[in-house]
Amino acid sequence: CHSFAFPTLSLSFLCLQRTMLELLNQLDGFEATNKIKVLMATNRIDILDSALLRPGRIDRKIEFPNPSESSRFDILKIHSKKMNLMRGIDLKKIADKMPGASGAEMKACCTEAGMFALRERRVHVTQEDFEMAVSKVMKKDSDKNMSLKKLWK
């Protein structure tokens, strides 16, 4: 990608535009009789070009919601399994404090809790480490999350 024609536009933007145009052209080139299925996945639906989402290009949108409360608890158990946890850590309480969290955020919470313990040169992770990790990981704009849900409608 070269930006000689548009010196005020960033090179990465021009490359992205070119890639998007090529993708749209390829999608438009499929005949309805072909037995070709195109699957796409994103965790950033908010930045997808509306031309990509119009009917005829992407016919079905399937949302995979974030884990339920019980699933969050199970995910925390999986990611904390090899951690040295203090007795009495209540992972259910931690899961309850992370409504709407993704699996990746659950993993990040465990990682951060471990890092809090390491920074203090402790061998065991405490409930407080998890509480601080939740605060750090879950710092996000709830309005943005609501607008993402509207995009799926």
Image (spheres, rainbow, N blue to C red):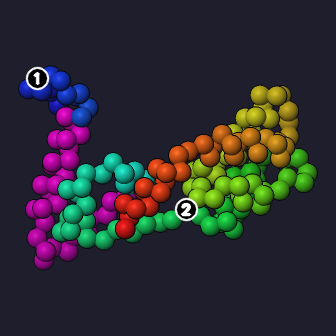
- Amino acid type indicated by mark 2: Asn
Locate residue 66 relative to residue 28 in the image: left or right. Answer: right
Task: Tell me where residue 26 appears, x and y as whole percent.
Answer: 14, 57
Of labels 1 and 2, earlier in sequence is 1
Looking at this view, name the residue that lies furthest to the right. 87
Q: Counting other residues with Cα less than 10 Å from the Cα at mark 1, is it few (<14), some (14-19), or many (20 or more)?
A: few
**Identity of the residue drawn at 58% across and 58% down:** 100
**Identity of the residue drawn at 17% across and 60% down:** 27
Task: Tell me where residue 42 appears, x and y as whole percent.
Answer: 39, 54
**Identity of the residue drawn at 85% across and 33% down:** 122
Residue 20 is one of the magenta-drawn residues: yes
Looking at this view, name the residue that lies furthest to the front. 143
Which residue is tagged 2? 66
Which residues lie in the magenta part? 14-41
Q: Which mark, residue 4?
A: 1
- Along the viewing direction, whichever of 106 and 136 lies nearer the viewer: 136
Quadrant (top left, top right, bottom left, bottom right) of the C terminus: bottom left
Q: Counting other residues with Cα less than 10 Å from the Cα at mark 2, is it few (<14), some (14-19), or many (20 or more)?
A: some
- Along the viewing direction, whichever of 23 and 36 lies nearer the viewer: 23
**Identity of the residue drawn at 78% across and 58% down:** 93
Gap between marks 1 and 2 measured at Cα:
43 Å
Residue 23 is one of the magenta-drawn residues: yes
Q: Quadrant of residue 15?
A: top left
- Amino acid type indicated by mark 1: Phe
